[in-house]
Amino acid sequence: KQEVTQIPAALSVPEGENLVLNCSFTDSAIYNLQWFRQDPGKGLTSLLLIQSSQREQTSGRLNASLDKSSGRSTLYIAASQPGDSATYLCASQNEKLTFGTGTRLTIIP
Amino acid sequence: GAVVSQHPSRVICKSGTSVKIECRSLDFQATTMFWYRQFPKQSLMLMATSNEGSKATYEQGVEKDKFLINHASLTLSTLTVTSAHPEDSSFYICSASYGGNTEAFFGQGTRLTVV
Protein backbone atom coordinates (compact mmCIF):
# COMPACT_ATOMS: atom_id res chain seq x y z
CA LYS A 1 0.00 0.00 0.00
CA GLN A 2 1.39 3.37 -1.01
CA GLU A 3 2.23 5.80 1.77
CA VAL A 4 3.02 9.43 1.09
CA THR A 5 4.68 11.63 3.69
CA GLN A 6 5.35 15.35 3.71
CA ILE A 7 7.89 17.06 5.91
CA PRO A 8 7.67 19.50 7.57
CA ALA A 9 4.02 19.58 8.62
CA ALA A 10 4.21 23.35 9.00
CA LEU A 11 6.68 25.97 7.84
CA SER A 12 6.94 29.73 8.35
CA VAL A 13 9.36 31.83 6.34
CA PRO A 14 9.84 35.57 5.78
CA GLU A 15 8.58 37.04 2.54
CA GLY A 16 11.07 36.95 -0.29
CA GLU A 17 12.86 33.81 0.78
CA ASN A 18 13.16 30.71 -1.36
CA LEU A 19 11.88 27.48 0.17
CA VAL A 20 11.60 23.75 -0.46
CA LEU A 21 8.78 21.43 0.47
CA ASN A 22 9.45 17.71 0.64
CA CYS A 23 7.37 14.70 -0.32
CA SER A 24 8.34 11.04 -0.03
CA PHE A 25 6.51 7.92 -1.15
CA THR A 26 7.10 4.25 -0.39
CA ASP A 27 6.14 2.61 -3.70
CA SER A 28 8.08 3.85 -6.72
CA ALA A 29 5.62 2.26 -9.18
CA ILE A 30 3.83 5.51 -9.91
CA TYR A 31 2.52 7.05 -13.12
CA ASN A 32 2.89 10.62 -12.00
CA LEU A 33 3.31 12.88 -9.00
CA GLN A 34 1.17 15.96 -8.50
CA TRP A 35 1.46 18.98 -6.27
CA PHE A 36 -1.64 20.83 -5.12
CA ARG A 37 -2.42 23.92 -3.16
CA GLN A 38 -5.36 24.11 -0.75
CA ASP A 39 -6.57 27.33 0.83
CA PRO A 40 -8.56 27.06 4.09
CA GLY A 41 -12.05 25.67 3.50
CA LYS A 42 -11.47 25.36 -0.23
CA GLY A 43 -10.87 22.64 -2.76
CA LEU A 44 -7.58 21.76 -4.41
CA THR A 45 -5.78 23.74 -7.06
CA SER A 46 -3.38 21.75 -9.22
CA LEU A 47 0.07 23.31 -9.35
CA LEU A 48 2.33 20.90 -11.17
CA LEU A 49 2.15 17.36 -12.52
CA ILE A 50 5.33 15.38 -13.18
CA GLN A 51 5.07 12.27 -15.29
CA SER A 52 7.06 9.27 -14.07
CA SER A 53 9.44 9.65 -17.01
CA GLN A 54 10.18 13.28 -16.17
CA ARG A 55 12.61 14.76 -13.67
CA GLU A 56 11.07 18.15 -13.13
CA GLN A 57 8.38 20.62 -14.11
CA THR A 58 8.34 24.39 -13.80
CA SER A 59 5.56 26.93 -13.66
CA GLY A 60 6.46 30.51 -12.85
CA ARG A 61 8.10 30.64 -9.43
CA LEU A 62 7.40 26.97 -8.80
CA ASN A 63 9.65 24.07 -9.67
CA ALA A 64 8.88 20.47 -8.81
CA SER A 65 11.36 17.63 -9.07
CA LEU A 66 10.86 13.88 -9.02
CA ASP A 67 13.28 11.10 -8.16
CA LYS A 68 11.31 7.90 -8.54
CA SER A 69 14.09 5.58 -7.53
CA SER A 70 14.51 7.23 -4.14
CA GLY A 71 10.78 7.90 -3.73
CA ARG A 72 11.13 11.64 -3.38
CA SER A 73 9.73 14.82 -4.81
CA THR A 74 10.37 18.42 -3.91
CA LEU A 75 8.48 21.63 -4.57
CA TYR A 76 10.69 24.70 -4.78
CA ILE A 77 9.08 28.10 -4.37
CA ALA A 78 11.21 31.08 -5.33
CA ALA A 79 10.84 34.59 -3.93
CA SER A 80 7.96 33.67 -1.65
CA GLN A 81 5.01 36.03 -1.26
CA PRO A 82 2.28 36.30 1.41
CA GLY A 83 -0.20 35.00 -1.19
CA ASP A 84 1.72 31.72 -1.24
CA SER A 85 0.45 30.97 2.27
CA ALA A 86 -1.64 27.80 2.02
CA THR A 87 -1.43 24.06 2.60
CA TYR A 88 0.54 22.21 -0.06
CA LEU A 89 -0.28 18.60 -0.81
CA CYS A 90 1.59 16.13 -2.93
CA ALA A 91 -0.05 13.03 -4.35
CA SER A 92 1.27 10.01 -6.21
CA GLN A 93 -0.89 8.44 -8.87
CA ASN A 94 -1.23 4.78 -9.78
CA GLU A 95 -4.83 4.41 -10.96
CA LYS A 96 -5.83 6.52 -7.98
CA LEU A 97 -4.25 9.38 -6.09
CA THR A 98 -2.62 8.83 -2.73
CA PHE A 99 -2.22 12.09 -0.86
CA GLY A 100 0.46 13.17 1.53
CA THR A 101 -0.25 14.70 4.88
CA GLY A 102 0.40 18.24 3.67
CA THR A 103 2.66 21.13 4.63
CA ARG A 104 1.00 24.24 6.00
CA LEU A 105 3.05 27.16 4.69
CA THR A 106 2.93 30.65 6.16
CA ILE A 107 4.79 33.50 4.50
CA ILE A 108 5.48 36.30 6.96
CA PRO A 109 5.20 39.80 5.43
CA GLY B 1 -7.12 23.05 -16.74
CA ALA B 2 -10.60 21.60 -16.88
CA VAL B 3 -13.35 22.92 -14.60
CA VAL B 4 -15.16 20.82 -12.03
CA SER B 5 -18.06 22.36 -10.16
CA GLN B 6 -19.26 21.01 -6.84
CA HIS B 7 -22.56 22.01 -5.25
CA PRO B 8 -23.47 23.00 -2.62
CA SER B 9 -20.37 24.53 -1.07
CA ARG B 10 -21.91 24.40 2.38
CA VAL B 11 -24.85 22.50 3.81
CA ILE B 12 -26.28 22.12 7.29
CA CYS B 13 -28.76 19.32 7.86
CA LYS B 14 -30.55 17.70 10.75
CA SER B 15 -29.49 14.34 12.05
CA GLY B 16 -31.36 11.53 10.29
CA THR B 17 -31.91 13.36 7.02
CA SER B 18 -30.16 12.72 3.70
CA VAL B 19 -28.00 15.15 1.79
CA LYS B 20 -27.02 15.07 -1.87
CA ILE B 21 -23.83 16.63 -3.21
CA GLU B 22 -23.32 17.16 -6.94
CA CYS B 23 -20.09 17.10 -8.89
CA ARG B 24 -20.11 18.31 -12.48
CA SER B 25 -17.39 18.44 -15.09
CA LEU B 26 -18.24 21.59 -17.00
CA ASP B 27 -16.04 21.41 -20.07
CA PHE B 28 -15.05 17.79 -20.53
CA GLN B 29 -16.50 14.32 -20.31
CA ALA B 30 -15.30 12.64 -17.15
CA THR B 31 -15.03 8.90 -17.48
CA THR B 32 -14.01 8.59 -13.86
CA MET B 33 -14.97 10.59 -10.78
CA PHE B 34 -13.56 10.29 -7.29
CA TRP B 35 -15.04 11.24 -3.93
CA TYR B 36 -12.84 12.19 -1.00
CA ARG B 37 -13.41 13.08 2.61
CA GLN B 38 -11.17 15.41 4.55
CA PHE B 39 -11.11 15.81 8.32
CA PRO B 40 -9.82 19.05 9.87
CA LYS B 41 -6.08 19.51 9.36
CA GLN B 42 -5.79 16.10 7.73
CA SER B 43 -5.21 14.95 4.21
CA LEU B 44 -7.75 13.68 1.70
CA MET B 45 -9.08 10.19 2.16
CA LEU B 46 -10.44 8.47 -0.95
CA MET B 47 -13.94 7.17 -0.34
CA ALA B 48 -14.88 5.73 -3.71
CA THR B 49 -14.19 5.71 -7.42
CA SER B 50 -17.03 5.84 -9.89
CA ASN B 51 -17.01 5.14 -13.60
CA GLU B 52 -19.84 6.36 -15.78
CA GLY B 53 -22.63 3.81 -16.08
CA SER B 54 -21.27 1.34 -13.55
CA LYS B 55 -21.34 0.84 -9.81
CA ALA B 56 -18.89 2.74 -7.67
CA THR B 57 -15.90 1.01 -6.13
CA TYR B 58 -15.68 1.82 -2.44
CA GLU B 59 -12.51 1.92 -0.37
CA GLN B 60 -12.18 -0.38 2.58
CA GLY B 61 -14.11 0.87 5.58
CA VAL B 62 -16.48 3.12 3.62
CA GLU B 63 -20.13 2.13 4.00
CA LYS B 64 -21.65 1.94 0.52
CA ASP B 65 -25.20 1.99 1.88
CA LYS B 66 -24.51 5.18 3.75
CA PHE B 67 -22.60 6.99 1.02
CA LEU B 68 -24.55 6.41 -2.19
CA ILE B 69 -22.71 7.35 -5.35
CA ASN B 70 -24.32 7.72 -8.74
CA HIS B 71 -22.45 8.47 -11.96
CA ALA B 72 -25.23 8.39 -14.51
CA SER B 73 -23.62 10.63 -17.10
CA LEU B 74 -20.15 11.67 -18.23
CA THR B 75 -20.58 15.09 -16.64
CA LEU B 76 -22.35 14.40 -13.36
CA SER B 77 -21.74 12.32 -10.27
CA THR B 78 -23.65 12.60 -7.02
CA LEU B 79 -22.83 11.60 -3.47
CA THR B 80 -25.78 11.11 -1.14
CA VAL B 81 -25.10 10.87 2.58
CA THR B 82 -28.05 8.89 3.90
CA SER B 83 -29.41 9.17 7.42
CA ALA B 84 -26.69 11.64 8.29
CA HIS B 85 -25.28 11.79 11.81
CA PRO B 86 -22.97 14.36 13.44
CA GLU B 87 -19.97 12.11 12.85
CA ASP B 88 -20.59 12.47 9.10
CA SER B 89 -19.79 16.18 9.39
CA SER B 90 -16.76 16.74 7.22
CA PHE B 91 -15.40 18.34 4.07
CA TYR B 92 -16.22 16.32 0.97
CA ILE B 93 -14.33 16.88 -2.30
CA CYS B 94 -14.86 15.37 -5.72
CA SER B 95 -12.51 15.10 -8.65
CA ALA B 96 -12.99 14.14 -12.27
CA SER B 97 -10.69 12.73 -14.91
CA TYR B 98 -10.64 11.14 -18.32
CA GLY B 99 -9.84 7.87 -16.59
CA GLY B 100 -6.76 5.77 -16.02
CA ASN B 101 -3.78 7.78 -14.89
CA THR B 102 -4.79 11.04 -16.50
CA GLU B 103 -4.77 14.26 -14.52
CA ALA B 104 -7.63 14.72 -12.08
CA PHE B 105 -9.40 18.05 -11.62
CA PHE B 106 -10.98 18.95 -8.31
CA GLY B 107 -14.19 20.59 -7.24
CA GLN B 108 -14.38 23.34 -4.64
CA GLY B 109 -15.50 21.01 -1.87
CA THR B 110 -18.64 20.80 0.26
CA ARG B 111 -18.65 21.51 3.98
CA LEU B 112 -21.31 19.26 5.54
CA THR B 113 -22.46 19.96 9.08
CA VAL B 114 -24.96 17.59 10.68
CA VAL B 115 -26.71 18.99 13.74
Image (cartoon, coloured by chain):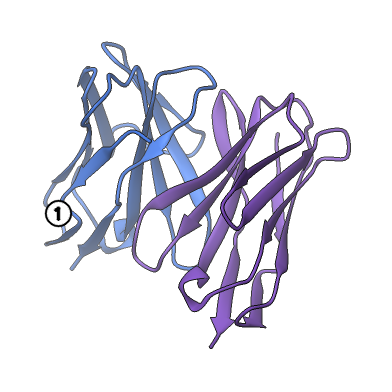
Chain colours: A purple, B blue
Q: Is residue A67 above or below residue B49?
A: below
Q: Position of residue B76 (x, y in %)?
A: 20, 27
Indicate the chain on which mark 1 is placed. Answer: B
Q: Position of residue A108 (x, y in %)?
A: 57, 86
Q: Is residue B106 above or below residue B30?
A: below
Residue A7 in sight: no
At horizontal 21% and vertical 31% (from top left) the residue drawn is B26
Q: Is residue B34 above or below residue A42?
A: above
At horizontal 54% and vertical 75% (from top left) the residue drawn is A81
Residue at the outermost right position: A70
The part of the image, by quadrant, that contains residue B6 is top left
A31 or A47, nearer to the observer: A47
Return the residue at label 1: B16
At horizontal 30% and vertical 52% (from top left) the residue drawn is B109
The part of the image, by quadrant, that contains residue B95 is top left
All told, the count of numbered labels is 1
* Quadrant in which the N terminus of chain B appears: top left
* Quadrant in which the C terminus of chain B appears: bottom left
Q: Amino acid at mark 1?
A: Gly
Residue A32 in sight: yes
The part of the image, by quadrant, that contains residue A61 is bottom right
B60 or A104, nearer to the observer: A104
